[in-house]
Amino acid sequence: MQVDTDRFLADLKRLREFGAFKTGVHRPTYSPQDMEARHWFLSRLKEEGLEAEMDGVGNILGRSKGPGPYLLAGSHLESQNEAGWLDGALGCVAALHLAASGLPVDVAVFADEEGHYGSFIGSRSFTGLLEEAEIDRLANKYHDKPLREALREAGLEGRPRLRADAARYRGFLEMHIEQGRQLEKRDLGIGVVTGIVAIWQWRIVIEGQQNHAGTTTMDERRDAGMAAVRLLAMIDSEFPRHCAERTVWTAGRIALSPGAPSIIPGRAEILFQYRDVDIDVLRRLEEVLRRCVTESNRRERTVATLEAMSLSTPAVCDPAFQDALEAAAEALAPGKSLRMPSGAGHDAQYLARIMPAAMLFVPSINGISHHWTEDTKDEDLALGMRVLAEGARRILAA
Amino acid sequence: MQVDTDRFLADLKRLREFGAFKTGVHRPTYSPQDMEARHWFLSRLKEEGLEAEMDGVGNILGRSKGPGPYLLAGSHLESQNEAGWLDGALGCVAALHLAASGLPVDVAVFADEEGHYGSFIGSRSFTGLLEEAEIDRLANKYHDKPLREALREAGLEGRPRLRADAARYRGFLEMHIEQGRQLEKRDLGIGVVTGIVAIWQWRIVIEGQQNHAGTTTMDERRDAGMAAVRLLAMIDSEFPRHCAERTVWTAGRIALSPGAPSIIPGRAEILFQYRDVDIDVLRRLEEVLRRCVTESNRRERTVATLEAMSLSTPAVCDPAFQDALEAAAEALAPGKSLRMPSGAGHDAQYLARIMPAAMLFVPSINGISHHWTEDTKDEDLALGMRVLAEGARRILAA
């Protein structure tokens, strides 16, 4: 019952050939490259002796034939556009090699964690949180192809959707690259994830009055752009007083209409989000955000409105699983692990709703992810695989 | 020598039919609608006894046959897309009726003041500031048609370009709608323009580091978007301490790249301009702007650079002409005039470089311009026409 890290690395590198792009991969969900990768992975599961099938949304489940109790492990195979070779793929291949090492581990591959068509289609389908009506409604966010059409073209139409048998499992494990620099900065090899942050994504729309930038005096203006600037500056000075240690906030988009040099913007739209693992912090920051919007409307001659686009729930990783992973790390690489939250979303956050779940991170070189230059050293990948296997062994033995 | 305001209004309304759009007009430069309007106007000049011709960029000059000294008057005939019926057209028809009333006034119609192809092509050509090489280079900013091709299609290819004979004229007069609310707010009828503001247009580019909005901690970020917000907030709080009474400043565009909700912007581009009639104020605000950019680069982990896109020269209206227009207003509508700068650019700013120039404003209903709802009451148009004629008479008699 020893994991073969050479074969693990070989499978990872084989997977890198599907949709190869520079040193990364381009495998959009349900694209020919993505489907090829899925079929190859399905055949690898069967080679390793699992009973494996692909379902109506492209999820793959490989069932271990040995006696229980079982663990479930996995991640996703598709990538962001022109992105890295490890994100998602690593967790799938790690799960395959947990099973290949003889551990009673079922392997799950979820579809569209990267959100080409929707939000976590695969893991939400598997955990019972995806309605047929939503599948009817969804379309590709880059080129508008309806999800139903994509599923038909991928040969998945009409297949039933797999649902998790939660009672079968002790819990779920997902290995992933960190996508940040916390491990690398500290020269560490293993991140034991404490929880997956929730993302509270807001749209702030500010309505003013479009007007001539030369003939409208400053006191007559209802400038939606400058109101947006002042509101964001206020939020950015208020948030540090109320956030937690690892809270992050981001205004990813500021769009002014019409956006011409000599026209006072009549409308501004801001996409603003913050992330934390603690629901109380998320709620507190919502209050701060609402107060800032109210204050903007008191001060400005514009009208700002706040709309919640998505308010996810933070997922806490199972404390006993965390302890097991940390003990495994201490045994194999003493002093080389760190407990840390995941700032990005992962399939594990949906699995955590129906069973204990945990995640293990390995370092990302320069913290890069969602880019084709994303990479991790082979030795870090191999150490992560061995710690994951030892952690799984300890969890199953508990 | 009495101006016929009924015929003046009738000509204005006839012109409104060329490219009629809702209650406004759509007459892009050199479009069939614009060329029809030009040919109609040319024939009207001839009907009124002027020697009139159209030149190689569509400029029209109608020469008065009587004895000098002469004034030159005019404006432009094309419109912004789906814009108002008065902008430009008013100054042309007013000039026609100065001549029609028997005053020794030449009538000039300039092409493309609205900048479909370039910046003040007509008045720059007429005043010797437009090179052939620039005509070769210019193209329509909405649909990329080369200017040369547009001129050929309009039947203007090969015609010589008219140049102003500055020695022939006492000066230049342009009547225009105010495009703001200063007159309407005060229930006034006549604006005597003191000068035409210069526009100093800047591009501020901020380079940061594009990164994952979840896994990049706040202290690691080089967020170009938030740096842009803080810089603009700084500019907006500094400018009021250094500006003049009628200075205006506008950030018409803020573009963050890539502009996605979960990506820290790696680059921000801001279009920022300010306008004033006083060159010393413009220079002082440039210093303030440069200090803010320097301060941003001292405080932030991003790099802001400032690029001047265009720095125009303010045009001062001739003081004696202003006095004559104000005296005319006092004679015809006592207490109903106001001296004011023009916040928008006009052909008069180029004519002012080679001869004394002045402008007369009439009120804009709700201050609206560059929109098809732009309008002015008939009585305000008629009063403006009569004050302009009386002012011209006084200037010529001086």
Image (cartoon, coloured by chain):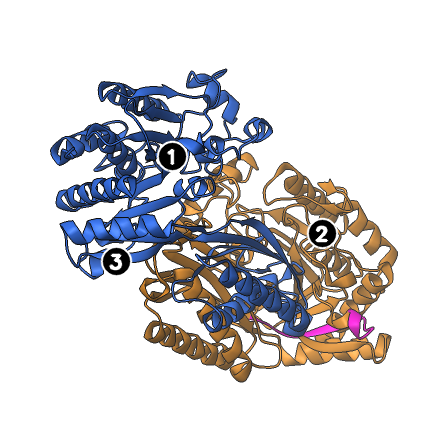
Chain colours: A blue, B orange
Distance from the alpha carbon under mark 2 to that under mark 3: 66 Å
Secondary structure, mark 1, is strand
Q: Residue furthest bottom?
A: B241
Q: Quadrant of residue B76?
A: bottom right
Can you say whether A74 is above or below B258 in the image?
above
Name the element at disc 3: strand
Q: Quadrant of residue A3?
A: top left
Quadrant in the picture for residue B382: bottom right
Quick one: B387 or B311, which is closer to the camera? B311
Left or right placement of residue B112 versus residue B1 in this view: left
The chain holding disc 2 is B
B50 or A322, nearer to the observer: A322
Q: Which residues are magenta?
A: B184-197
The residue that mark 1 highlights is A169
Do circles 1 and 2 both sit on a common chain?
no
Which residue is located at x 43 percent, y 64 percent? B226
- Disc 1 residue type? Tyr
Residue indicated by mark 2:
B84
Residue type at mark 3 is Leu
- Is the residue B28 above or below the residue B340 in the image? above
Q: Are marks 1 and 3 on the same chain?
A: yes
Does A249 sit left or right of A366 as displayed?
right
Q: How many marks?
A: 3
Q: Earlier in the sequence, mark 1 or mark 3?
A: 1
Residue that carries the numbered disc 3 in the rendered image: A338
Q: Badge 1 sits on which subunit?
A: A
